[in-house]
Image (cartoon, coloured by chain):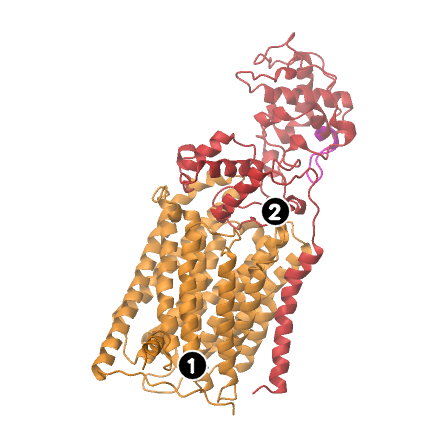
Chain colours: A red, B orange
Amino acid sequence: MLNAKNAIIGIMFLLLVTGVTSLVVVVPAATFNPQPSIGLRDYSPAEARGRLVFQRENCYVCHSQFVRFQDEGMGPTSQAGDFAYDNVNLLGTLRNGPDLSFEGGLYPDEWHIGHLKAPRSYLPGSFMPSYSYLSSSDIKDLVAYIQSLGTRNTRAWDTKDVNIPEKYRNLESPLGQTVANIGAGRGIYNQNCSACHGFEGRADVPLAKMFYPKPAANFRLPRYKDFTDGHWFNKVARGVPGTRMPRWDQILNSEQIWYVVTYLKSLAADQDLVPKAGREKYYDKSVLQPGEIPRKYEGAPKAGKGH
Amino acid sequence: MSVVESVRDRLFPNTPDAAAKLWLTSAVVWGVLGMTFGVFMAILFVFPEFTKGVPWLSFSRIRPSHVNTVVMSWVSMASIGAMFYMLPRLLKTQLYSERLATAVGWSWNLFALFIPLTLLNGLSEGREWAELIAPMDWWMLINLGLVGYLTFATVATRKEPQLYVSVWYWMGSMVGMTIVWIVGNRTFVPLDGLNDAIANWFYAHDVLGLWITTMGLGIIYYLLPKLTAGKNGEPGNPIFSHKLSLIGFWGNFAFYTGIGAHHIIQAPVPEWLKAFAIASSVLMSIPVYSASANFFLSTQGRWENLAWNLPLRFVTFGWIMYALASFQGSLQAVRSINWYQHFTGIVSAHAHLAMLGGFSVVLFAAIYYIIPRLYKVEWYSKKLVVVHFWTFTVSFVMFFLVWTTMGFVQATSWVMGINVQQTVPFLQPFTFVRMIAAISMIFSVYIFAYNLLQTVRSAKRQEAASSRAYNPSPVAPAAADD
């Protein structure tokens, strides 16, 4: 009973389904070829083996691998080029566990090995299955893969921000971390910055909660220790586009900005109860010892013009 | 009769409806297995150390086995079985080849056995929903092709010139699923990065859209006129509007095909693709509401049948859940809502609303309707059917609401800036209630399977009693084209 009418309907149907399928699968495959993100490298052999373990154990059912713009504290928003070296996508659709896009470097290898074997010993209340059955070489590869997530990408953390203009990148502060300089910076900070970032950089004022996107979290977090002078200067001077953080180089002169940077650097460094090796650069030892930063206003800072 | 022939007739009988019997009964076996996987995962959320150290009982290996068993074994086999029963009756002919249909049935059964065997042993491609390895992909393609061939050959040899809307849906599903399967499991065309994700989500959503939904809608369109028949033999309602059902058909295939990318709205894939997927998702309202309205209006005037007609109860519950799931799905695809609820349990609960509350229940209805007609016996126990209905529906609603609430807890916590690890303790009460609901639901499914087993056994006993020397008479060869 193949008459003309049925044949036309059948051809229309085939054209419809194959047409839409081509539009949503074949056209993207032909036209959408993002270049690798700046600084992204391919997987090393161990990482590639670890990725196969990750696929075999289907970890993607609970751990997604892309960061959306609204995800706070998960790293920068994922860009198309970040996935250039993936042959099987592991984007995931459920976050029963945390997103792993920038998991690399957050914990040491030993932590990951132990956590994979006995998750609840490390994170009480977690419902992640135990992977104690994996062979030790599989676990090693898997950890290598986890550590590669995000760290293969120089955009991963602010400290490696490639968006810092060349002229700021290698700047060194002209000011030493002296009590007087820190105090001067605190004065300028309190007048200009504390409304949003809070006193002592704690981000505990109403505006810090109200703004979206939020102002930088607590400047006392240890990770701010890794900011270079140039990075600090860039953030303050150029502001953060897309947020309420203004371009302070329009308001303060560069000397005042350096005072603020001196103060900000002292906040994170202040958190070292036991000073770590390599942190000495934050202190001018002849003047100040770690943990001895006086909280009293001293010196004569040049106040900012305010705004 | 030689030994070979007797073995052949035993394994691949050529009697009418032999295929439907095989497909439907084996589907229930896989349904029980697939849903048990699900319940096992619900238990593992509460007692994560339960299977510590056993690789093939690890949560992350059970999850793909659950998805693939439920989709490819339970729902697919039951839909095809129901189609093999309904197709000859709608077309006033015989299935093109019962022998081939039973042979594909055994092949599909073996395939269904290999799904957990491969996935639980760590043979996974690592693509969500499309985890099966390449040989399995090819095997499935052959099975699908043969089922499609049987469908089209039966339609070609029909005696009834008018094609009922169900037949449209089933023929469309055969074409749609073949395309979706080839694109989704493209064995020899590796795509990189995000293009792989685009093809992956095309597959994951269209196996629902162009296969399960369309097969299921065809079954509902068949069942409703039958089940609205009066108690004293009054004829059932015809389908309210043939035009509405055709709008549903064309709309479904036009809009459902392109919506896969709404799973990755906030991933860095091309914006035009996201926009197309969102627009298609919202336009899905047209086929969904035209079908739902058609179902509702076709039952008008016969609502009292719900009091005594148990399959009608199931099918009505099923299509209402389908309509709700589709309504929810259109909303969830919108950027402003997706922003909030993506990555949370709301999405998983939504998937269960369509698959478990919707089409699984429709297939329960189909099995409850078909089995007595296939085996010429009444159900072993009507009471157990009632128990199945109420236990299943009540615990399903609890299951769905708890999981959705859990998703809202996740969504709100994340918006408040609480990180994912910190939200896990908040979820624990919900996972516990979800486990209780899941256990009570699987209990009702076991009751259903037991009831089916006893029914089939009583049919076999009756058969043996009525004719000691039972000799299946071969079917006359399919009539030549008229």
Image position, residue B199 (x, y; %): 60, 58
Write down the quadrant of residue B261 in the picture.
bottom right
**Nearest the eye: A153 or A169:** A153
Q: Which residue is drawn at 48% across and 47% down?
A: A56
Q: In this view, does B75 lie above or below B300?
A: above
Q: Which mark is residue A37?
A: none
Q: Which of marks 1 and 2 is in front?
A: 2
The residue type indicated by label 2 comes to Asp
Which type of secondary structure does the marked residue at label 1 adopt?
A: helix
- Visible residue check, residue B390: yes
Left or right, residue B377 beside residue A119: left
Q: Do the residues labelled 1 and 2 touch (CB within 8 Å)?
A: no
**Nearest the eye: A107 or B229:** A107
Left or right, residue A265 beside residue B207: right
Q: Does the magenta stretch include residue A240?
A: yes
The local crowd at label 1, few if under 14, some if 14 to 19, many if 20 or more residues have their Cα within 10 Å, is some
Q: Give the Cα separation between the discs numbered 1 and 2.
A: 51 Å
Q: Which residue is drawn at 61% across and 75% down?
A: A13
**Secondary structure mostly taken by the magenta-highlighted segment of the chain:** loop
Image position, residue B352 (x, y; %): 44, 59
Q: In this view, does B97 lie above or below B262?
A: below
In the rendered structure, which segment of residues is drawn in magenta? A235-247
Considering every residue shown, the one lying at the far bottom of the view is B482
The residue type indicated by label 1 comes to Pro
Residue that badge 1 annotates? B225
Which type of secondary structure does the marked residue at label 2 adopt?
A: loop
Q: Mark 1 lies on which chain?
A: B
Residue that badge 2 annotates? A86
